[in-house]
């Protein structure tokens, strides 16, 4: 969670955030925080989209929805201030920058498999000033902020728990995440 807070800390509070349903929802959907801006969450798992809505996502999009069209519609054609990708799928990495506004921030949080390559429209970065980050680090203040958010008593964090398993069932748990 601290890694995502570190990576998605643009200078100004985003007016629009687009994220995948795999990311820790408090990153953008912080209940009771009017400064968080509007949040669009896209994903393929209905249960995770329900959690996103419970945590305050303004719009959720399923796997058959046109994310690009929805982002254009919701942002009046401008694009999102912050786009967070966390699937680790090359096709989602390639698509993520298209959802950002000029000067926007794209975080490629989901790590792809070793040896993976992706195609990116370099125009977005060079001429449109889109910033690209692919983090796997955090600062002490990110850990402190994550701890502060997770310590909030007004948030029901149990909504993140979608199932339980014994330690010896770990391989099956990871298989279900595919």
Image (cartoon, rainbow, N blue to C red):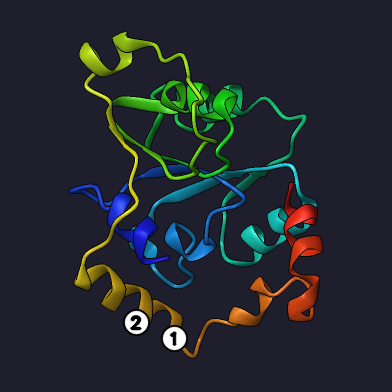
| Number of dots carrying numbers | 2
Q: Residue at x 67, y 25 (%)?
A: 66
Judge whether residue 59 can be spotted in this image. Answer: yes
Residue 147: where, in percent of width, then height?
36, 81
Q: Residue at x 60, y 52 (%)?
A: 22
User: Which element type, helix, strand or loop, lies under badge 1?
Assistant: loop
Nearer to us in this view, 135 or 155: 135
The residue that appears at 49% across and 70% down in the rendered structure is 31
Q: Is residue 164 visible?
A: no
Viewer-side residue, 2 vs 45: 2
Q: Spatial distance from mark 2 to mark 1, Cα to Cα? A: 7 Å
> In the shown orientation, is residue 157 left or right of residue 175?
left
Does residue 52 appear to the left or right of 4 in the view shown? right
**Residue 152 marker:** 1
* The N terminus, quarter of image: bottom left
User: Observer-nearest residue: 148 or 176?
Assistant: 176
Against 25, residue 13 (above or below) is above
At x 53%, y 61%, the residue is 25
Q: Position of residue 13 (x, y in %)?
A: 27, 52
Check whether the beta carbons of the residues at disc 2 and disc 1 lie within 8 A of each other. Answer: yes
Quickly name the residue at label 2.
148
Viewer-nearest residue: 16 or 174: 174
């Amino acid at each position: 969670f601290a890694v995502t807070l570190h990576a998605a800390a643009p200078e100004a509070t985003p007016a629009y955030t687009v994220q995948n349903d795999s990311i820790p929802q408090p990153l953008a959907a912080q209940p009771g925080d009017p400064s968080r801006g509007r949040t669009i969450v896209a994903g393929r798992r209905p249960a995770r989209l329900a959690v996103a809505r419970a945590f305050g996502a303004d719009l959720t999009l399923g796997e058959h929805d046109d994310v690009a069209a929805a982002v254009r519609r919701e942002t009046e054609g401008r694009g999102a201030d912050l786009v967070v990708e966390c699937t680790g799928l090359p096709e989602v990495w390639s698509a993520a920058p298209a959802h950002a506004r000029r000067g926007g921030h794209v975080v490629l949080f989901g790590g792809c498999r070793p040896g993976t390559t992706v195609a990116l429209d370099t125009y977005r970065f060079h001429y449109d000033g889109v910033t690209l980050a692919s983090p796997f680090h955090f600062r002490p203040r990110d850990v402190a902020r994550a701890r502060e958010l997770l310590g909030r008593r007004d948030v029901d964090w149990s909504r993140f728990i979608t199932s339980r398993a014994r330690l010896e069932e770990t391989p099956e748990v990871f298989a279900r995440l595919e």
